[in-house]
Image (tube, helix red, strand yellow):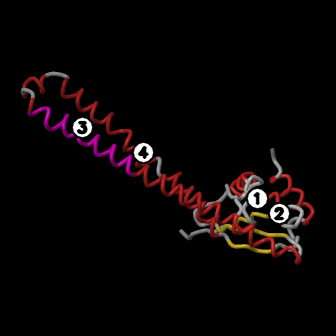
């Protein structure tokens, strides 16, 4: 089965009137070092929610020729923001794996103790002829269930999030010519997203 690749366009309208709304208003840094506005980061994430493993993401910029110099600081802020999120998520994922494997090791130790060592300590007839053997087996598998569930089921969402952040931090830029939306419509939508309270 072939790998299907879909393209996701995230549109922006960049001009001198709206560029200040794209950055965090509480960040006094120069434009090239300013942080992305939280509402703008939320807009980008919501626009990319339909991504799949082989999806290609691009930022579609609509701007006038005289405003193209504003694109570079804005895209640097976007790429820097999602690169930081990716790095933090990778750190969290490594800690998650360490905790899960440590828990799995502890549970395997208890499993071996209840199923291997405890029967040798107790009298064989006492262990075999009572419900103690069955109780220990059930207890061992109940203890083992949570770490196995963590390792089997809960790692995929974290990897999907890391993959999305990586794509957003490396997405390329294309310049729109107003074929899908007019510049005025994009100006209105971008300003409305950035100015949310």
Q: Which residues are magenta?
A: 98-120
The local crowd at label 4, few if under 14, some if 14 to 19, many if 20 or more residues have their Cα within 10 Å, is some
List the residue tagged with mark 1: 23
What is the x, y in percent for residue 167? 61, 65
Q: Secondary structure at mark 4?
A: helix
In 3D space, how far apart are the residues under numbered discs 3 and 2 (Cα atoms)?
59 Å
List the residue tagged with mark 2: 19
The local crowd at label 2, few if under 14, some if 14 to 19, many if 20 or more residues have their Cα within 10 Å, is some
Mark before the other along the chain sequence, 3 or 2: 2
| Placement of the C terminus among the 4 image quadrants | top right
In 3D space, how far apart are the residues under numbered discs 4 and 3 (Cα atoms)?
18 Å
Horizontal arrangement in the rendering, residue 30 relative to residue 106 (left or right): right
In 3D space, how far apart are the residues under numbered discs 1 and 3 (Cα atoms)?
53 Å
CB under 8 Å between discs 2 and 1: yes
List the residue tagged with mark 4: 150
CB under 8 Å between discs 2 and 4: no
- Which of labels 1 and 3 is toward the front? 1
The local crowd at label 1, few if under 14, some if 14 to 19, many if 20 or more residues have their Cα within 10 Å, is many
Picture residue at 78% right of the left edge, 59% below the top: 22
Horizontal arrangement in the rendering, residue 162 relative to residue 117 (left or right): right
What is the x, y in percent for residue 41? 71, 56
Above or below 41: residue 65: below
List the residue tagged with mark 3: 110
- Which of labels 2 and 4 is toward the front? 2
Our reading of the magenta stretch's main secondary structure is helix
Residue 162 among magenta residues: no
């Amino acid at each position: 089965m072939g790998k299907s690749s879909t393209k996701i366009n995230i549109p922006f309208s960049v001009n001198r009137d709206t560029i200040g709304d794209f950055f965090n208003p509480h960040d006094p840094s120069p434009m090239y070092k300013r942080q992305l506005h939280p509402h703008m980061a939320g807009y980008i994430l919501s626009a990319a929610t339909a991504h799949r493993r082989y999806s290609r993401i691009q930022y579609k910029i609509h701007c006038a020729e005289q405003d193209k110099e504003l694109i570079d600081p804005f895209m640097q802020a976007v790429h820097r923001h999602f690169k930081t999120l990716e790095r933090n998520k990778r750190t969290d994922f490594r800690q998650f794996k360490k905790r899960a494997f440590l828990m799995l090791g502890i549970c395997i130790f208890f499993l071996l103790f209840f199923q291997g060592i405890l029967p040798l300590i107790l009298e064989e007839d006492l262990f075999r002829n009572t419900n103690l053997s069955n109780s220990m087996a059930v207890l061992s598998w109940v203890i083992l269930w949570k770490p196995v569930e963590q390792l089997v089921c809960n790692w995929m969402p974290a990897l999907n999030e890391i993959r999305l952040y990586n794509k957003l931090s490396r997405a390329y830029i294309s310049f729109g010519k107003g074929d899908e939306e007019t510049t005025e419509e994009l100006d209105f939508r971008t300003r409305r997203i950035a100015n949310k309270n």
